Amino acid sequence: MKPIFARTPSVEERPTLVAGLKATDGWQVRRCQIILMSADEQLKAKAIASRVGLSAQQVRRVLHAFNQAGLTCLTRQKSGRCDDQRAFDDQARVRLREIVHQSPRTFGQETSLWTLRRLAQVSHQEGLTQQEVHFDTISQTLAEMNLSWKRVKHWINSPDEHYARKKNDATG
């Protein structure tokens, strides 16, 4: 692999790089160190990586960024995706809220209790999502909609016709 070096900083860029060595953000300090070591000392990425405690590939990324974008590589960029990646759009969320308030039997399920997995299946069957999503996605979506979700509690019901009377009369 051909070694990469930072281009020589211009007269306007050098004071910013030197000032960046004293920045409060360690991320920016490290980038300034990498660029100055490469430009001034002509060190290879592996040597710089051992000095600053990063991998050689991370050092190469910094050098490429400086060579292409200049000082803008010293400011952090957002690392998340810029497009909307929600599984449920706004209309689907409204419909999901309606589904939660209905019995699962309405949607062909054999039980009257919702689980997160059943909601995932039904939401896909109803066309709310393009593919069946994970139950954690359903849980997170419900939380974002301010719907609390708790596991179903199973209650024991006695077949005794006098159960209610006996239960109320019990002491202890």
Image (tube, rainbow, N blue to C red):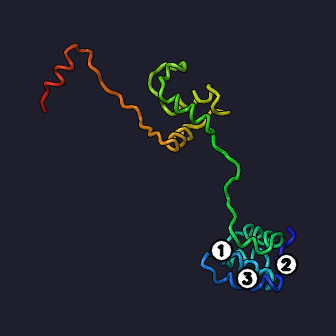
Amino acid type indicated by mark 2: Arg
| Quadrant in which the N terminus is drawn | bottom right
Dot 2 alpha-carbon crowd within 10 angstroms: few under 14, some 14 to 19, many 20 or more: some
Mark 2 → mark 1, Cα distance in angstroms: 22 Å
Of discs 1 and 3, which sits in the foreground? 3
Q: Are marks 1 and 3 in contact (CB under 8 Å)?
A: no
Residue at 44% from the left image edge and 26% from the top image edge:
113
| Quadrant (top left, top right, bottom left, bottom right) of the C terminus | top left
* Pointer 2 with pointer 1, Cβ within 8 A: no
Residue highlighted by disc 1: 53
The reply, left or right, for residue 29 in relation to residue 61 is left
Nearer mark to the viewer, of 2 and 1: 2
Asked which secondary structure carries label 2, the reply is: loop
Where residue 6 sits in the image (x, y, percent)?
A: 82, 77
Find the distance from the CA under tag 2 to the CA under tag 3. Answer: 15 Å
Q: Which residue is mark 3?
A: 16
* SS category of the residue bearing label 3: helix
Q: Which residue is mark 2?
A: 7
**The residue positioned farthest toward the top in the image shown:** 161
First-in-chain label (2 vs 3) = 2
Total labels drawn:
3
User: Which image quadrant for residue 64?
Assistant: bottom right
